[in-house]
Image (cartoon, grey):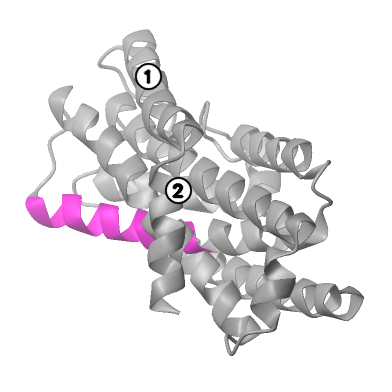
């Protein structure tokens, strides 16, 4: 399985679309937002530079895992590659786990690029907070990697890209990626995994600890998405 994970990682890192939309695009958006907000705070008192550093890091991470996992799996189903793998000794759960793991690894550059820009723009955190926040965002990306695998088995190759983009943008809009959500919209956003993911931005504020409620919610979504991916994989196996 480790060989498959290494292969998937190398394929992703060589993908020009990944480099553009998962690395460069979130970084450019971050620069745009912090210039628009200046040195002020967003709703809730979080400094804009810290808030959008996290939201753009999550934006790049979610985009990386959703697009890469869902579209690649769908295309591999169409080409017959998944069917060929089923004829080998590799169990289905190992294939699914390899997809999730390899996608999650490729989120690290997306997070690191935005963090680097944030540090250059004046975001100041202790070494422990930088490390803790990076680790929290990386572990959170497994949730969306599992969702990407599920979408890859649920959608046909011709429709997977628009389905992923619509899912991705809706979660971002209602999850606080572009602007902090509040009021009645926040009550709805609590059911959005991206909102929970962006709640980790509070960790950047002095005196604030990791949002345990958000971590618990993300863990619940991870269980749901992994279960959905496993079910859809079995259904795909029956149809093959």
Q: CA distance from mark 2 to mark 1?
A: 21 Å
| Label 1 crowd (10 A; few <14 / some 14-19 / many >=20) | few
Please state which of residues 236 and 133 is positioned toward the viewer in this rendering: 236
**Label 2 secondary element:** helix
Q: Is residue 186 left or right of residue 156?
A: left
Please name the residue shown 56% across and 56% down the image. 144
Q: Quadrant of the N terminus?
A: bottom left
Q: Which mark is residue 127?
A: none
| Quarter the C terminus occupies | bottom right
Q: Is residue 137 left or right of residue 154?
A: left
Taking depth in this image into account, of 63 and 182 the one nearest to the observer is 63
Residue linked to disc 2: 12
Q: Which residues are drawn in magenta? A: 127-142
Assign the magenta stretch its main secondary structure. Answer: helix
Query: In this picture, is 190 found above or below 40?
Result: below
Element type at mark 1: helix
Q: Is residue 37 visible?
A: yes
Name the front one of labels 2 and 1: 2
Read off the residue under disc 1.
28
Task: Tell me where residue 85 appears, x and y as whole percent.
Answer: 64, 76
Q: Is residue 5 left or right of residue 221?
A: left
Residue at left 52%, top 66%?
100
- Please tell me in which quadrant of the rendered image residue 60 appears: top left
The reply to whether residue 151 is in sight is no
Residue 197, image x, y percentages: 48, 51
Residue 240 in magenta?
no
x, y percentage for residue 39?
25, 16
User: Is 136 contained in the magenta span?
Assistant: yes
Q: Residue at x 81, y 60 (%)?
A: 154
Residue 226: give x, y in percent of width and height.
64, 73
């Amino acid at each position: 399985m480790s060989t498959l994970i290494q292969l998937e990682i190398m394929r992703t890192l060589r993908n020009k679309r990944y480099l553009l939309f998962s690395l460069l695009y979130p970084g450019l958006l971050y620069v745009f937002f912090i210039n628009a907000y200046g040195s002020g705070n967003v709703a809730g008192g979080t400094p804009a530079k810290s808030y959008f550093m996290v939201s753009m890091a999550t934006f790049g991470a979610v985009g990386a895992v959703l697009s890469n996992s869902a579209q690649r799996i769908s295309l591999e189903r169409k080409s017959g590659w998944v069917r060929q793998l089923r004829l080998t000794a590799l169990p289905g759960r190992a294939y699914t786990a390899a997809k999730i793991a390899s996608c999650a690894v490729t989120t690290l550059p997306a997070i690191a690029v935005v963090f680097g820009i944030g540090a250059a723009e004046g975001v100041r955190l202790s070494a422990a907070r930088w490390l803790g926040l990076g680790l929290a965002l990386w572990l959170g990306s497994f949730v969306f990697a599992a969702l990407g695998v599920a979408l890859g088995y649920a959608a046909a190759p011709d429709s997977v890209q628009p389905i992923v983009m619509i899912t991705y943008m809706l979660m971002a809009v209602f999850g606080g990626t572009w602007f902090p959500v509040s009021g009645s919209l926040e009550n709805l956003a609590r059911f959005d995994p991206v909102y929970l993911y962006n709640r980790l931005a509070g960790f950047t504020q002095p005196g604030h600890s990791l949002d345990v409620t958000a971590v618990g919610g993300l863990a619940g979504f991870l269980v749901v998405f992994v279960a959905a991916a496993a079910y859809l994989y079995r259904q795909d196996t029956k149809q093959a």
